[in-house]
Amino acid sequence: MTAQPPYSFQHLTTTITLFQFGFCVLLPTALSLTFSGGDVIRNFPREWNQLFVYVKLSAVVYGATALATKSLAYKGVTYVTKVVFKSAKLIPTMVVGVIMDARAIKAGNKNVKKKNYSVWDYGSALLLCGGAAGFCLSPNTADNDDTSSNLVEDAKPDEMVESFTHSQGPHWIGISLLIASVFCDAFVPNISEQLMQQGVNVAGKTKSLPRKDSGKDSGDELDDEELEMKSLLASNTDAENSHRDQNQAQKKEGLSSASLMVNTNSIGFMILFLSTVISSQYVPIVSFMAVHPHFLLLHLVVGCGLGTAVLAYTELIKRSGPAFAVAVATLRKVVTVVLSYLIFPKAMTITHFASSCLVLVGIVVGFVGNKR
């Protein structure tokens, strides 16, 4: 029996997605066990109401990808349209962040800091989005919108299939799906930031608080009971103080980026893994990788690279905020194109030159706005 060529494997999309989800769980877990004492294990939700928060976040993440992919099946929606909409998600991210923070503060959440963006910030974001959209077009797509396969942006296998099928349905539905996808993209980093800010409360892991409350209750009892309690705890004072300090520090810092990644991606990984087993894809995938070990190696490299990128992106959200993280992700596309010109020299088009000017002006506008 002739071995099947690796890139003709019918379950390629499933295997790539499975490894991506898997490494988004395994990599932060390994780093947490090595450097943070396994905080991802302690912060993993153990009740349905705690888990449901991450189920909703996973649904929003899925919607951001699935809605954009589905939009390609409608008339007039090409990869060019999709990339332009996706490149503009920075502005919705800023708007959604302001609204969500205002609602959280109104609800009495003291951990949330209200975001304030100036006209300079929105102007800078608009220029960066326009420049990134232009950079994502290859020389051919700049002149012909129908050659959507020439986009620099990486094309996912299921999106490739969708784009080459006959488009059907009214144009406005496809655009509506793209708009919904962009707003899902805007909600993801803002929800992630709020979960990391108040994550200990959400995960319900502040174990020292019940002890503290029980201590207050015991203070209302008779003096002899209080003295007896103090004498029983005297030998463990140092351990209790250390444990309390650790929990207080964790509460102040919020949920770690590694914990958020594990809590969110473990849901997607389990659903995808179970669907793979139920749909009888698991055995063919394992058999194929046994015949093509280099195929397994490529998946490991891709999974590790994506897991590292997602962890860095999530940490950037925690440290610098959603808008800054999305701006960096938007500029990533520009850097990708610039590197492609350096590594594989080619003629630079007027579109790319104009896009580079927009990006440069956007950076300058943002810098001037921060100085004012």
Image (spheres, helix red, strand yellow):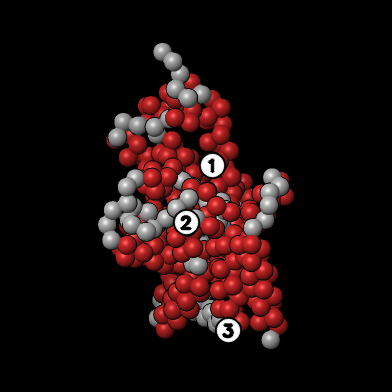
Q: Helix, strand or loop at disc 1?
A: helix
Decide: is 249 above or below 312: below
Q: Is residue 70 left or right of residue 325?
A: left
Q: Residue at x 61, y 62 (%)?
A: 351
Badge 3 marks a residue whose secondary structure is loop
Query: Considering only order in the chain, which callout, 2 or 1, is on the residue closer to the N terminus?
Result: 2
State the residue position of label 3.
118
Q: Is residue 127 visible?
A: yes
Which numbered disc covers residue 97? none
Residue 259 x/y as whole percent = 51, 55
Quadrant (top left, top right, bottom left, bottom right) of the C terminus: bottom right
Residue 167, image x, y percentages:
32, 51
Tell me if mark 2 has few (under 14), some (14-19) or many (20+) residues whose alpha carbon lies within 10 angstroms of its own: some
Label 3: how many residues lie within 10 Å, few (<14), some (14-19) or many (20+)?
few
Which one is in front in this view, the residue at disc 2 or the one at disc 3?
2
Residue annotated with mark 2: 145
Q: Amino acid at mark 1?
A: Gly
Given residues 274 and 295, the one toward you in this image is: 295
Q: CA distance from mark 1 to mark 2?
A: 32 Å
> In terms of image quadrants, where is residue 122?
bottom right
Q: Which residue is mark 1?
A: 303
Disc 2 is placed on an element classified as loop
| The quadrant where residue 246 appears | bottom right
- Tag 1 and tag 2, C-beta contact below 8 Å: no
Q: Which residue type does callout 2 highlight?
A: Asp
